[in-house]
Amino acid sequence: MIIIASILALFPFLLLCLFTQPTLDDFGYALNLSDKSFIETQINIYMNWSSRYTATGLLILNPIQWDSWNGYKLISLGMIVLFVIATFYMFYKITTNNTITIILGCSFIFCYLFMIPEIVSSFYWLAGSATYHLANILLIFFVGLSISYYNQKSLLKILMLFLLVFLIIGCNEISMIYLDICIFIIFIYSYFKKKKLNSNWLILLVWAGFLTLLILLSPGNAKRSSSIIHHIPLLESFFMAIKKSIVIIFRYGIIVFIINLLVFYNCRNDLKKYSFSILNFPFYFYIIALFIFLFLGSFPSLVSIGSYPPQRTVNVIFLPVLVFSMIISYKIVVSTNLYNLKISPNKLSFILLFIIFSYSFIVGNKEFLSVHNNLYLAYYDLISGNAYKYNKEIEARYKKIEYSNNETIVLSPLNYRPRSIFISDLSPDQSFFYNQSMAKFFSKKTISILEK
């Protein structure tokens, strides 16, 4: 049932790639190579705006600058396909069993698609996916490759780990923190396991530390932070981060935990055969660890920009929610009396479907406690034709701009705004950064839309 559910979840998100369109920052970044080289652009951004060199590198190479609008859609498709590959790779390295890999991988994929806080930034908006979702993909690959290297060392694997560290730290600061913690844990675990320092993990830890300093000391980060007027006192930020962590657990963690618990219970006999020494701590230890990860994901935004992390950042914070929910489910299933409880697979399937459809019925096409129903929205936008009509409307807008001889372009507001792939429209205000970057992209003086 979880395999079927994951396939049915993947299907609409793959189709939506056909209809996504660039927006907001995409046009601005795509203009960089028109007057600077790739390296010059990266240095300029690092010195004046952001230290996220991996994300900005991908954004600078946006295919739309070569009039490849389909290339933009292919990147969205690649973000989904790479996520699926990374997930199955990681679980195969953990279990080395094809059947368990498929089941656990499908559970991971379904929960991610079903509950990810902002689906648009995950796949369909390059500025969001290159910064946050790509980091999630690379982190999953890193975990899988770390396990593979730990079991069978090779020069190629350690070089790939160094590359992954470089790429992940260049995506966003929250992923950087999570990666640093992971490397430190692996280094300490390796030391206590073998009673000696592992030079490769030590060098990897130093490499990660060097890159972390490169990010933290970026002049661009300092300039951007200094432009923020609202600052929250440190103690207040601390308690707000605790509050946000609790909210994230209740908002996204409960459904994910229940689904994973059902899946792990159904596989309990196979899972009982595994012995993961790193999972030998009591299950409440992992609950505390989860809370620490969530706190570390929420606190930096409150301190640096004076607000709760935006939903696209919560996409990264959601990853440990999903990972630790699986770890806690595993601990409960194999270490408690639940293991001996007899529940038929048919009843488990019924409970799983009941949870999915109940949640879909409650949330539907609206927001419920700031939670979206990603699956409902994806199917709704496809079946209603909103995604198709939005794509056609945007294409017609591009043609109107390109074929117009006027330097000043005034467009009609978009009629179709599919929530699964749409973020923002142009503004009636010509000075809005989206309007300005699109005008420059199409070599026009100004572009705006009519007031509604």
Image (cartoon, rainbow, N blue to C red):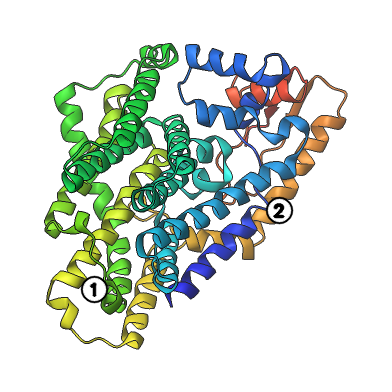
In this rendering, would 407 be left or right of 144?
A: right
Residue 244, placed above or below residue 205: below
**Which quadrant of the structure image shows residue 380?**
bottom right
Above or below residue 114? Residue 321 is above
Q: Pick whichever, 397 or 84, lies toward us.
A: 84
Q: Give SS at disc 2.
A: helix
Q: Looking at the figure, which quarter contains the N terminus?
A: bottom left
At 37% from the left and 47% from the top, the residue drawn is: 146
Residue depicted at 61% across the width and 17% down the height: 39
Q: Quadrant of residue 114?
A: bottom left
The three-letter code of the residue at mark 1 reads Lys
Residue sitting at x 25%, y 59%: 327
N-terminal of the two: label 2 or label 1? Answer: 1
399 left or right of 50 in image: right
Image quarter (top left, top right, bottom left or bottom right) of the C terminus? top right
On the rendered structure, is 262 left or right of 149? Answer: left
In the image, residue 312 lies at what x, y percent? 43, 40
Give the alpha-carbon distance from disc 2 to disc 1, as whole Å. Answer: 51 Å
Q: Residue drawn 23% across and 60% down?
A: 276
Q: Which residue is mark 2?
A: 389
- Res. 419 visible in picture: no
Which label is found at residue 145? none
Secondary structure under tag 1 reads loop
- For badge 2, the amino acid type reads Lys
x then y, percent, for residue 370: 36, 49
Q: Position of residue 347 (x, y in %)?
A: 32, 86
Which of discs 2 and 1 lies nearer the camera? The answer is 1
Residue identifier under label 1: 272
Tally the marks: 2
| Above/below status of 199 relative to 354 | above
